[in-house]
């Protein structure tokens, strides 16, 4: 299994969909379907019971291609509030 550590996400392990390759610089990992993996992670985060961590919240925002400012407007809040949510997860 491979621990996927994109965007500071924790506890994302891949059982398949990747290949490890040896290069002259060390081991490299190639993800076979990055878009599909991203969708699967986002779907799992949306369905996750309980609160999202700051990194999870940021991962969703970035994959919706939203700035902190635009997300704040959608929620009727401030950009500063979104930054705090992403930093502290609350």
Image (cartoon, rainbow, N blue to C red):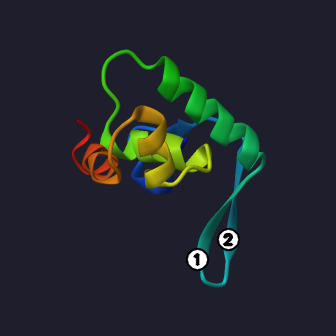
Name the residue at the bottom extreme. Answer: 24
From what the image shows, is residue 68 above or below residue 36? Answer: below
| Secondary structure at numbered mark 1 | strand
Q: Quadrant of the C terminus?
A: top left
Report crowding for label 1: few under 14, some 14 to 19, many 20 or more residues within 10 A (C-alpha): few
| Image position of 74 with respect to 67: above or below | above
- The quarter of the rendered structure image containing the N terminus is top right
Give the numbered dot on residue 22. Answer: 2
Residue at screen point 21% across, 45% down = 88
Question: In the visual, does 1 lie left or right of 28?
Answer: left
Q: Which mark is residue 76?
A: none
The answer to whether mark 2 and mark 1 are in CB contact below 8 A is yes
Residue 78 showing in the rendered view? yes
For the residues marked 2 and 1, what is the alpha-carbon distance in whole angstroms? Answer: 6 Å
Rendered position, 25 above or below 80: below
In front here: 66 or 12? Answer: 66
In front of the other: 9 or 61? 61
43 or 75: which is nearer to us? 75
Q: Quadrant of residue 49?
A: top left
Residue lying farthest right? 32
Where residue 39 sits: x, y (%)?
67, 35
Q: Specify few, some or many for label 2: CA neighbours under 10 Å numbering under 14, 14-19, or 20 or more.
A: few
Residue 5 in view of the camera: no
- Give the residue drawn at x 41%, y 40%: 56
Mark identifier at residue 26: 1
């Amino acid at each position: 299994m491979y621990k996927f550590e994109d965007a500071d996400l924790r506890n994302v392990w891949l059982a398949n969909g990747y290949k490890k390759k040896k290069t002259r610089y060390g081991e490299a990992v190639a993800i076979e379907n990055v878009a599909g993996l991203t969708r699967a992670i986002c779907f799992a985060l949306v369905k996750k019971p309980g609160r999202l961590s700051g990194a999870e919240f940021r991962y969703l925002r970035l994959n919706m291609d939203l700035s902190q400012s635009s997300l704040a407007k959608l929620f009727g809040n401030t950009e500063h509030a979104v930054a705090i949510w992403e930093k502290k997860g609350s």
